[in-house]
Amino acid sequence: MDHNKLALPVGTTLDRFIMRKQEDFPYATGELSQLLRDIALATKIVNREINRSGLIDIAGAYGNRNVQGEEQQKLDVIANIRFIRALRNGGEVCTIISEEDEEMIQTGNVQGKYVVAIDPLDGSSNIDVNVSIGTIFSIYRRVSPTGNEGNEQDCLQTGTHQVAAGYVIYGSSTMMVYTTGNGVNGFTYEPSLGEFFLSHPQITTPKTGAIYSLNEGNSNEFSEAMTAYVDHCKQQGYSARYIGSLVADFHRNLLKGGIYIYPATKKAPNGKLRLMYECNALAFIVEQAGGKSSDGRTRTMELEPKGMHERCPLFIGSTELVEKAEEFMAREYEAATAAALK
Ligand SMILES: O=P(O)(O)OC[C@H]1O[C@](O)(COP(=O)(O)O)[C@@H](O)[C@@H]1O
Ligand SMILES: [Mg+2]
Ligand SMILES: [Mg+2]
């Protein structure tokens, strides 16, 4: 696909961009375009709630724990409700996987051709302290015939089956960044006009960089190989940058070059992040931008999901940095394999 053919000027509205991209697919029916618009609509509402969260009583804990055992923040719940409502009313989505719901959410749109996996509010620990937070989404085409509710087969597809994926960052400005498999584009929200405008066309990530992002507070729990890789980053003189909101750390590294890692630790042998609504979406984006994503060994988008809330280690960012980290992890796997054979 010749990306230049699709290049649209900075300042194009998201709506126009979606429409224009659809025209390049003669058989497109407009349903995916409408679904992207539904997500953009919910994003505008959630953005408004976030911007005024300090003024109205939506700060703090909601008083429930989600399926991960994490304390739900009020904004986690509000964002979850807003996205589910927009996807249900939009009519294109039959089933939703959400971080905040243990079970699949059936929307009642049995004719809907799409399944959405969503992290409605990412970076929950940063909600009440005015630090950038986000939303992450993956879109799949259902595999079961329309006319019924979506099922587990529709929901547990590998990341390579994503038809679109994206994230929203609610930061100094609010941006939506997404891909449909033809490059990555970023749109900045203009609240006074209520519109997203193309601000970052055809995003590509540098092949290498000098930023590493991980929670070194967990370093006592790191494997030898992981500790060795962190030392390597320090020897290289890389800068440590960690916001603690995956979307914000990922976005910075995507634009500047860098690597984000949430590794397996002794406490969390599968890491912390969730394959279906955090890792797969960002992996699709980073690959479309020329970067790389794996669990330290296997390409993230080829990981076979076994459960909706499954966790996996994440090594994501500039190709050369991820490959270097994988080199370090390979030594560990080889040692483990050799030990197992003894
Ligand atoms: O506090 P830790 O262990 O470093 O974890 C931070 C990571 O956890 C997350 O907050 C998990 O996402 P949620 O906030 O959506 O649960 C990521 O955004 C972030 O990168
Ligand atoms: Mg998250
Ligand atoms: Mg979340």
Image (cartoon, rainbow, N blue to C red):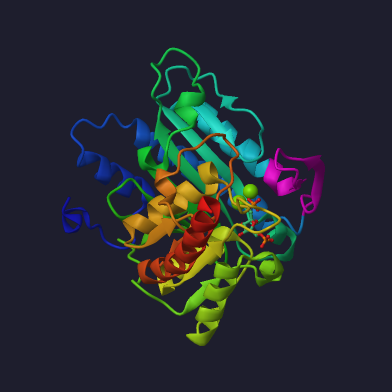
What stretch of residues is rendered in magenta?
56-77
> Can residue 139 be seen at all in this image of the molecule?
yes
**Where's residue 314, x and y in %?**
52, 57
Q: Quadrant of the C terminus?
A: bottom right
> Which image quarter: residue 231?
bottom right
> How many numbered dots are placed on residues in this image?
0
Q: Residue at x 22, y 58 (%)?
A: 7
> Which image quarter: residue 26?
top left
Q: Is residue 58 left or right of residue 234?
A: right
Q: Nearer the viewer, residue 187 or 149?
A: 149
In the rendered image, residue 181 lying in the magenta stretch gets the answer: no
Q: Residue at x 35, y 72 (%)?
A: 206
When the figure is inspected, residue 52 is found, relative to residue 324, above or below; the finding is above
**Where's residue 110, x and y in %?**
47, 17
Q: Nearer the viewer, residue 256 or 55?
A: 256
When the figure is inspected, residue 73 is found, relative to residue 206, above or below; the finding is above
Q: Hey, which residue is sitting farthest top in the picture?
A: 147
**Where's residue 269, x and y in %?**
63, 52
Q: Is residue 324 left or right of residue 100?
A: left
Q: Quadrant of ligand 1?
A: bottom right
Q: Hey, which residue is sitting farthest front in the picture?
A: 342
Q: Residue at x 35, y 56 (%)?
A: 287
> Can residue 197 be seen at all in this image of the molecule?
no
Q: Hey, which residue is sitting farthest right in the picture?
A: 63
Q: Residue at x 49, y 35 (%)?
A: 116
Q: Is residue 68 left or right of residue 242?
A: right
In the rendered image, residue 58 lying in the magenta stretch gets the answer: yes
Q: Nearer the viewer, residue 283 or 113?
A: 283
